[in-house]
Image: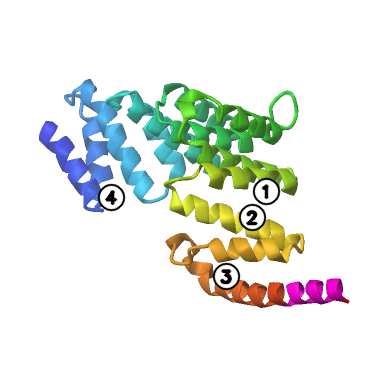
Amino acid sequence: NEALFWLAKTYAEDSLYAEALSLTKLLRSDPQFPKRLHTQLDEVNAYVFYQQEIWDSTAFYLEKALVNAENKTELARWQYLLGQLYSVLKQPEAASRWFNKAKSNTTDPVLYIHARIYESQLVMNEEGNSVQTALNDLEKMSKRERFDGYEDVLFYAAGGMALQLKDSARAKILYQKSNRYNTEHASLKNKAFLKLATIAYGQADYEYAAACYDSLNLQDESLAYQAAKLELRRTILKELVKNIKTVQQQDSLQ
């Protein structure tokens, strides 16, 4: 039985999904197969369906396999994954429930933060605006000792919430705070500069937008798909700002 179980896992790792599922079905129907191994079969089934992007079956078997988690950290990660799966399946209440469980079990501040963000986007709370509540929560979290060193992540996430509320002034302050606290997450700093540049450009604050675009590292892989567009905008803004300053100077002199 143990050998057949490992054979099913090997099939799954080798992308032989039909063989893996056939074997797990055979083992599950065998009255002699030990009950203690059924949850491990569930884990194999969850993995096979996940690889094929069959999200409902993945969630079904992953829930059954949670008892296999070796520690709280792994359990929280699986619960977070269940939240993501139910989010994709458009089942917000189930998604919110699993994100809450992940928050209660995790010791990873980043996972906690993103679980809170996901949750706020799914279900409106009884007081009304869940986005506003989440924004306030993220700002409060930035003051807690538990999240020391993650202020840049918190403020960046809060900036996104502010944009959802169409509060660009608050978003600008939050993205600036994110960059101020950011000492090691280069990609996140790049994203914050891009958000600030986009806000400033939309407000016709071309001088500040140019400064933000100039701060971008266009070698960042996350910007690769729009690097050419950003480089063009940066070049045009430099020339535009130069001309604006000339106009301002001449206007003052005259």
Q: Position of residue 248 (x, y in %)?
A: 80, 71
Chain-order first, disc 1 or disc 2: 1
**Residue of label 2:** 196
Foreground tag (3 vs 1): 1
Whole-Å distance between the Cαs marked 3 and 1?
Answer: 19 Å
The residue where tag 4 is placed is 17
- Contact between marks 3 and 2 (CB within 8 A): the answer is no
- Front position in the image: 205 or 230: 205
12 relative position to 220: left or right: left
Residue 189 seen anywhere in this rendered image of the structure: yes
* Membership of 40 in magenta stretch: no
3 or 4: tag closer to the N-terminus = 4
Could you tell which of marks 1 and 4 lies nearer the N-terminus?
A: 4
Q: What amino acid is labelled 2 in the image?
A: Leu
**Is 87 on the left or on the right of 202, as rendered?**
left
Residue 193 locus on image (x, y percent): 58, 56
Label 1 – label 4 distance at C-alpha: 48 Å
Q: Residue lying farthest left?
A: 3
Q: Are marks 1 and 2 in contact (CB under 8 Å)?
A: yes
> Looking at the picture, how far across and down is residue 242, in whole percent?
69, 75
The colour scheme of the drawn protein is rainbow
